[in-house]
């Protein structure tokens, strides 16, 4: 009897998990199918849409890489991502360190102020920022994205790093200063190497958040070769009014999977960062 | 770099001096981040408020203040009123579903089972992959002719024959019919936020002290009672945090609506953020766009207050 109950509970658990995994992943399975399916097979309503009724093909990948600007989107995304990572590290690391070490009074207020900036979303800022971009002649330039993306990476990464720095005991720096390092030297030579996993997390997030970003890129960039993947794929792989479903799905899949794999390993830290330690 | 404190070998006796210089160093370290935020969030926010009180357009972006005219015009516009309603329906419905489902999923994920890494990867995919690209997958799934959902319904005999339950037409036109298009964007938003809420709830559930549950078990409390009297009250702050962040991300976002329907059919899925974009950027009416986007602000401010209060309470717990 007890055994039967156990089996039933196991079965229940696996069906719940299976249903959720199916729900989460099905659109991506759907991309895989479309990316390798012949057009004739893809566009026959009577064919079973879940299987390859005709042999798979690499035609869509060829179209994607040689007849569209997909490689340019990937390069643009990479350039913007790396530049945003650099700006974020240069500003968030020192700020987080200072807030973690000297967060009394105004430091704490400042920390909450940083947090509140999440609540002024891109949908309120994109209209004035589009005017900034045109005022500085940065429309249709990747520089507009490079300068704007840190508005969401800096607050987030500062919060995340504050948590990391707080876990490093002050004694270590004090010891280093007694050994003759300056205050700044103690930070740069002793604390930063200890916070390396936090800094790596920040690199991953600044990059993935830039890659995910949609609204600013949609607003600032309309020239095809300047687009990033997150807007290039949805807006450009359309001929006239007709979606090129095969290449479109191939592009979405290729750009999604690598970043998803990396992100998965860091998601817990992401949550810890933006809920500002409310979740422990 | 010639930073304060550089030449000063720290010693216990010069304590006041060091603290003084630490203050300077602290300000120097924080300044770049604060200046960046002030220039790129503070200034544009002020400009958004000014635009909303002016008659600026993309063609003529000069600031001539016209008072509250834009807000009055927005409130008189039926499309705006529809967007406002849609935004609330879209946000509240999707986030309520997310909270229920994420609770189920988090409870299941806490149990030991084989293949956890793979299941975790699959259920997190909608959040970890770029959202505009994931939504493109859904666009193809909602295709008016080749939708696999319609195919299954036809296969099961529920659609496409004379006496079928869902009608004789061969397709449901997910994104082309008023009620169904709203259901579609809500479904995709649920899909997208669910992983985030799940991870937050997981953190909350695993922070409950095990001995508390065991003590209740020993006292003979049923699983239902344990959930109702212990787990839910203890994780309530976490549940609200998950809900509030879901609300922020949904209330202000336009990706799902933009990619799937562009607000259509006839504005039936138009939300404040997408309407801001169409009016302010595509339509070139900066003043109207700014005014529409600022209608989001009171809700966001209220959510911010709630989040801060909840977070403070959690720290006490």
Image (tube, coloured by chain):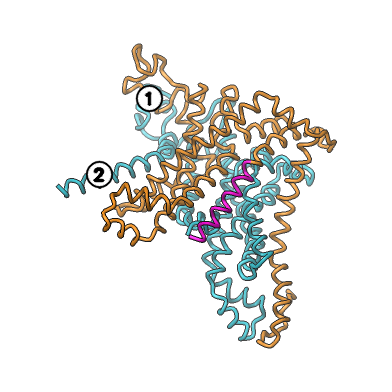
On the rendered structure, is A94 left or right of A49?
right
Quick one: which chain is orange?
B
Give the residue at mark 1: B151
Give the residue at mark 2: A11
Residue A195 position in % (x across, y down): 55, 69
Say whether residue B308 is magenta.
yes
On the rendered structure, is A52 left or right of A251?
left
Tell whether label 2 touches label 1 (CB within 8 Å): no
**SS type, badge 2:** helix
The magenta region covers B299-317
Residue B115 visible here: yes
Residue at 63% in and 34% down: B272
Q: Write down the colour of chain A.
A: cyan
Gap in Å between the C-alphas at discs 1 and 2? Answer: 29 Å
Quarter of the image for the N terminus of chain B: give it. Answer: bottom right
Residue B216 position in % (x across, y down): 31, 56
Residue nearest the observer in this picture, B211 or A93: B211
On the rendered structure, is A216 left or right of A47?
right
Residue at 45% in and 56% down: A265
């Amino acid at each position: 009897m007890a055994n039967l109950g156990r089996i039933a509970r196991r079965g229940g658990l696996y069906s719940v998990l299976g249903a959720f995994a199916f729900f989460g992943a099905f659109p991506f399975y759907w991309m895989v199918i479309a990316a390798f399916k012949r057009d004739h097979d893809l566009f026959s309503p009577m064919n079973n849409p879940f299987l390859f009724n005709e042999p798979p093909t690499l035609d869509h990948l060829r179209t994607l890489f040689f007849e569209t600007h997909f490689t340019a989107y990937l390069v643009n995304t990479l350039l913007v991502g790396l530049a945003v990572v650099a700006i974020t590290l240069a500003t968030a690391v020192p700020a987080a360190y200072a807030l973690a070490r000297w967060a009394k009074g105004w430091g704490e207020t400042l920390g909450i102020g940083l947090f509140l900036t999440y609540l002024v979303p891109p949908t309120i800022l994109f209209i004035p920022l589009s005017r900034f971009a045109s005022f500085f002649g940065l429309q249709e330039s990747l520089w507009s994205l490079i300068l704007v993306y840190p508005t969401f990476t800096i607050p987030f990464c500062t919060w995340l790093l504050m948590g990391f720095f707080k876990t490093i005991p002050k004694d270590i720096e004090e010891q280093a200063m007694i050994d003759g390092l300056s205050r700044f030297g103690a930070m740069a030579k002793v604390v930063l190497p200890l916070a390396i996993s936090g800094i790596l997390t920040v690199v991953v997030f600044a990059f993935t958040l830039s890659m995910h970003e949609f609204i600013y890129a949609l607003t600032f960039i309309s020239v095809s070769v300047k687009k990033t993947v997150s807007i290039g794929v949805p807006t450009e792989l359309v001929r006239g009014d007709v979606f090129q479903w095969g290449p479109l799905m191939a592009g979405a899949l290729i750009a999604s999977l690598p970043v998803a794999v990396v992100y998965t390993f860091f998601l817990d830290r992401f949550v810890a960062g933006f809920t500002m330690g409310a979740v422990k | 770099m010639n930073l304060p404190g550089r030449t000063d070998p720290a010693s216990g006796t010069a304590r006041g001096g060091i603290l003084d210089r630490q203050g300077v160093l602290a300000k120097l370290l924080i300044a770049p981040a604060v200046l960046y935020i002030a220039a790129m969030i503070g200034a544009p926010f002020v400009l958004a408020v000014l635009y909303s009180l002016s008659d600026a357009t993309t063609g003529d972006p000069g600031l001539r203040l016209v008072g509250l005219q834009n807000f009055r015009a927005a409130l008189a516009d039926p499309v705006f009123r529809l967007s406002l309603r849609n935004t609330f329906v879209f946000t509240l419905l999707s986030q309520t579903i997310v909270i229920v489902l994420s609770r189920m999923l988090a409870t299941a994920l806490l149990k030991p089972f084989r293949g956890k890494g793979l299941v975790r990867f699959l259920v997190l995919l909608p959040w970890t992959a770029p959202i505009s690209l994931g939504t493109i997958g859904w666009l193809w799934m909602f295709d008016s002719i080749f939708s696999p959902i319609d195919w299954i319904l036809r296969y099961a005999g529920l659609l496409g024959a004379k006496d079928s339950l869902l009608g004789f037409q061969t397709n449901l036109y997910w994104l082309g019919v008023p009620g169904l298009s709203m259901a579609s964007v809500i479904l995709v938003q649920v899909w997208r936020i669910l992983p985030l809420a799940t991870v937050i709830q997981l953190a909350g559930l695993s922070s409950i002290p095990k001995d508390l549950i065991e003590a209740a078990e020993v006292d003979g409390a049923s699983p239902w009672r344990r959930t109702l009297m212990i787990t839910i009250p203890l994780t309530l702050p976490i549940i609200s945090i998950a809900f509030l962040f879901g609300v922020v991300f949904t209330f202000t976002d336009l990706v799902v609506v933009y990619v799937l329907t562009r607000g259509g059919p006839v504005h039936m899925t138009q939300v404040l953020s997408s309407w801001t974009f169409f009016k302010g950027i595509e339509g070139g009416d900066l003043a109207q766009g700014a005014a529409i986007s600022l209608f989001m602000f009171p809700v966001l401010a209220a959510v911010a207050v709630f989040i801060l209060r909840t977070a403070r309470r959690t720290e006490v717990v």
